[in-house]
């Protein structure tokens, strides 16, 4: 994938545990032994299907504390789900990495336990729901030279667009807006979503995809949460559940970013991510449905269909496996996964407290 994204080797190393001397499996011919901690969200089954087709991977065991989840995991996995939680999994199996797909409020705990045990982590988004957990994760990554990757997807959907924008097709990027409206699909949504302390807020839940993509195309870190807001509307059976969230950011260098997410798409209608980019020499729009519209100053409008924008790499999990087994550069480094997780956590906090102009720490 390095051809399309122009991800320089030095950039990759700067954000990877490899720069710290971490061991990878490159050239050993061994299969990566993976355990799965939690079957709480449907995203985990896509990862399991990818793992089943990947000759570099051996899914050793799964863990979940819910009987229905265990039954579904056994149906998909084809073997019994032997463990009730990540602690039993880590104590009982020899693993190289752990896939975390617990309830959002328990993901930080599972990721920290895996890192403490010396295992790399691939997590569904969000990685955790508390800044303190993220600080612990970052400290363990540095101490133990481990990788932590988060399943943000827009880099894989819009890779070719990112390459064009990074090459300066619209000049320096000075502003971005993105929106990720979602359908709640209440009847099919896991019930833990609506339990106190399990979800962690709509901004931290959904906004990471857009936050991560903007970070990638601008090559700028987030410097400040300017403001954020949330609302609990449209779901009377759970009046405290957040269904709407906005956040405004400033990037290093001064570019502004505005993101919106919600769970208010009417039933039966499609959901799609959209992004608008304003540059010093043009602008662009991106859509999961409509692809890229690029308008460079002084040149004709250019369009690329959505299926022309996809990365060679099919999924962040495939990148994670490739890094650990072959040392290939992923689309997203551990450092980027942690930075973008911090961006959504700080915005969620700002929405909950009403604070504005919240600065990012120099380091986690």
Image (tube, grey):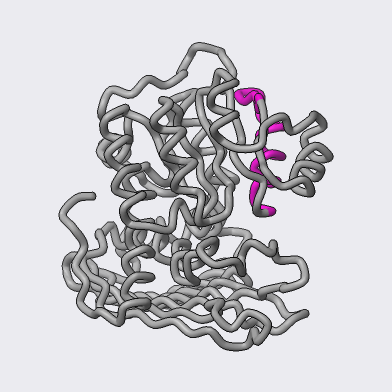
Question: Which percent across, then down, holds residue 361?
Answer: 18, 58
Above or below, 253 against 334 in this view is: below
Q: Nearer the viewer, residue 320 or 189?
A: 189
Q: Nearer the viewer, residue 169 or 250?
A: 250
Magenta span includes 174: no
Question: Which percent across, then down, holds residue 249?
Answer: 29, 74
Decide if residue 193 is on the left or right side of residue 134.
right
Does residue 204 appear in this view? yes
Above or below, 288 against 233 in this view is: above
User: Looking at this rendering, what residue extends furthest in the front direction?
Assistant: 196
Residue segment shown in magenta: 42-60
Magenta span includes 49: yes
Question: Which percent across, then down, holds residue 168?
Answer: 30, 63
Instruction: Name the image quarter holding residue 7.
Output: top left
Above or below, 98 against 191 in this view is: above
Question: Which percent across, then down, holds residue 171?
Answer: 27, 70
Q: Nearer the viewer, residue 65 or 122?
A: 65
Q: Residue at x 48, y 70 (%)?
A: 201
The number of callouts visible is 0
Q: Residue at x 46, y 18 (%)?
A: 25
Instruction: Name the image quarter holding residue 95.
Output: top right
Decide if residue 16 is on the left or right side of residue 35.
left
Does residue 283 appear in this view? no
Q: Residue at x 25, y 60 (%)?
A: 220
């Amino acid at each position: 994938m390095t051809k399309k994204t122009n991800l320089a080797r030095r950039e990759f190393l700067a954000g990877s545990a490899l720069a710290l001397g971490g061991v990878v499996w490159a050239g050993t011919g061994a299969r990566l032994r993976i355990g799965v901690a939690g079957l709480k969200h449907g995203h985990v089954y896509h990862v399991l299907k990818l793992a089943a087709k990947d000759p570099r991977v051996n899914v050793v065991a799964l863990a979940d504390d819910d009987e229905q989840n265990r039954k579904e995991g056994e149906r998909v996995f084809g073997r019994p789900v032997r463990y009730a939680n990540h602690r039993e999994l880590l104590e009982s199996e020899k693993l190289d990495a752990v896939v975390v797909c617990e309830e959002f409020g328990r993901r930080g705990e599972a990721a920290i336990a895996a890192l403490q045990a010396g295992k790399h982590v691939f997590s569904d988004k969000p990685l955790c729901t508390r800044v303190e957990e993220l600080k612990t994760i970052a400290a363990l990554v540095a101490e133990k030279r481990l990788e932590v990757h988060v399943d943000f997807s827009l880099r894989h959907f819009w890779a070719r667009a990112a390459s064009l924008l990074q090459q300066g097709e619209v000049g320096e990027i000075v502003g971005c807006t993105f929106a990720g409206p979602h359908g709640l699909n209440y009847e099919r949504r896991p019930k833990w979503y609506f339990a106190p302390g399990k979800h962690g807020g709509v901004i931290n839940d959904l906004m990471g995809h857009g936050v991560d993509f903007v970070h990638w195309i601008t090559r700028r870190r987030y410097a400040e949460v300017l403001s954020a807001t949330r609302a609990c509307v449209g779901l009377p059976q759970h009046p405290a559940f957040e269904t709407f969230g906005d956040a405004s950011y400033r990037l290093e260098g001064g570019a502004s970013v505005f993101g919106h997410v919600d769970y208010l798409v009417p039933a039966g209608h499609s959901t799609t991510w959209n992004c608008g980019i304003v540059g010093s020499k043009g602008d662009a729009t991106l859509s999961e449905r409509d692809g890229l519209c690029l308008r460079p100053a002084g040149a004709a409008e250019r369009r690329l269909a959505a299926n022309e924008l996809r990365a060679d790499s099919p999924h962040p999990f495939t990148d994670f496996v490739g890094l650990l087994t072959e040392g290939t550069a992923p689309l997203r480094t551990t450092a980027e996964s942690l930075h973008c997780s911090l961006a959504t956590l700080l915005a969620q906090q700002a929405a909950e407290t009403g604070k504005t102009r919240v600065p990012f720490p120099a380091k986690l």
